[in-house]
Amino acid sequence: MVLSDLIRQYKLGKISEKKLLSLIEDIKYNEYFSSLDNEVNFDNYRQNLTGIPEVILAKDKTEKDLEKIIFAKLDQRLLLTKVNQTKFEHLKKSWQEKMKTSFPFIYNDRGQVLFSKAPKNFKALSKGILVLSGGTSDLSVVEELKCSLLFFKLKCRVHNDVGIAGLKRVLHIAEPIKRAKLVITVAGMEAALPSVVAGLTSAPIVSVPTSTGYYGHFKGLTALLSMLGSCSPGIAVVNIDNGFGAAALAWKILNVHKKLK
């Protein structure tokens, strides 16, 4: 029912003011959200409000859940995180059987990320983002981060395996760190990397703790608390293994910086 019909009914005394306001709220809700099988609510205005579209966390969703979601959003660029190989293969097969066309997504198996292929006019921008990983064991999170940045049309430079167990590895890239506009560090174990890097640059630091380490790392909790407890100022910390969250925060920092100029 459209708004003009509701107002007409209210003027005729067919509905109360309270009922009118309630129905108007329903219209506003249905404009902002669309439901799928009473299981999924798509947030149609999230990108307008936040600059970031809905991103699908595939972990704990079934293959059928993901299939329904991507087929309902054929007109949008999509990013799905934590997509294991089994789910990827199911989605690809289902797409090819139903759509009879090539699969329009790129899959990064190490980062477990599935994202829409870029349109022809797509151009990623270089904004001075530098990504540093503590060790090779952190590369799955780095790959999720890189793919997420690309989804936001952002390029990055990456230096892997520069953890502070060999401090000279960090000092060797001191100049690129100083020149960076924003640095993202990805580290597990005791995660001291962002504390060291923050002492080498005036750029903001976004830090991703990873669930990498021996048994005392408590699935990344040690790294998370270490980053949060850093004595170096200017460090923001996202959740454990959350490469996407770091990319989203980087995008927002750079976007705000652009607006403030």
Image (tube, rainbow, N blue to C red):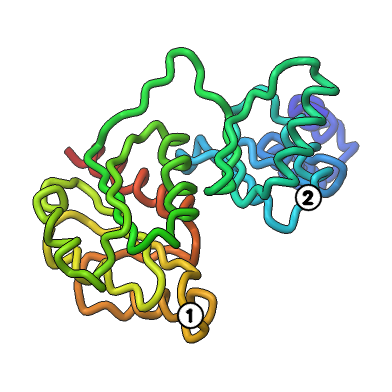
- Residue 257 x/y as whole percent: 23, 43
Q: Residues within 10 Å of mark 2 (few under 14, many from 20)?
A: few
Circle 1 Cα neighbour tier, 10 Å, few/some/many (<14 / 14–19 / ≥20): few
Q: Residue at x 14, y 48 (%)?
A: 176
Q: Nearer the viewer, mark 2 or mark 1?
A: 1
Asked which quadrant contains residue 74, the reply is top right
Reading the chain from its start, which is encountered first: label 2 or label 1? 2
For mark 2, give the secondary structure.
helix
Determine the secondary structure under disc 1: loop
Query: Which residue is labeled 2 in the image?
Result: 18
* Of 246 and 112, the residue lying toward us: 112
Three-letter code for the amino acid on which mark 2 is drawn? Lys
Q: Amino acid at mark 1?
A: Tyr
Q: Residue at x 17, y 38 (%)?
A: 261
Side (left or right) of 116 relative to 167: right
Say whether residue 67 is visible: yes
Viewer can see residue 17: no
Look at mark 1 in the image and give the residue it sits on.
214
**Residue 245 image offset from top left, x and y in percent:** 46, 54
Image position of 113 (left or right of 191) = right
Q: Position of residue 120 (x, y in %)?
A: 47, 13
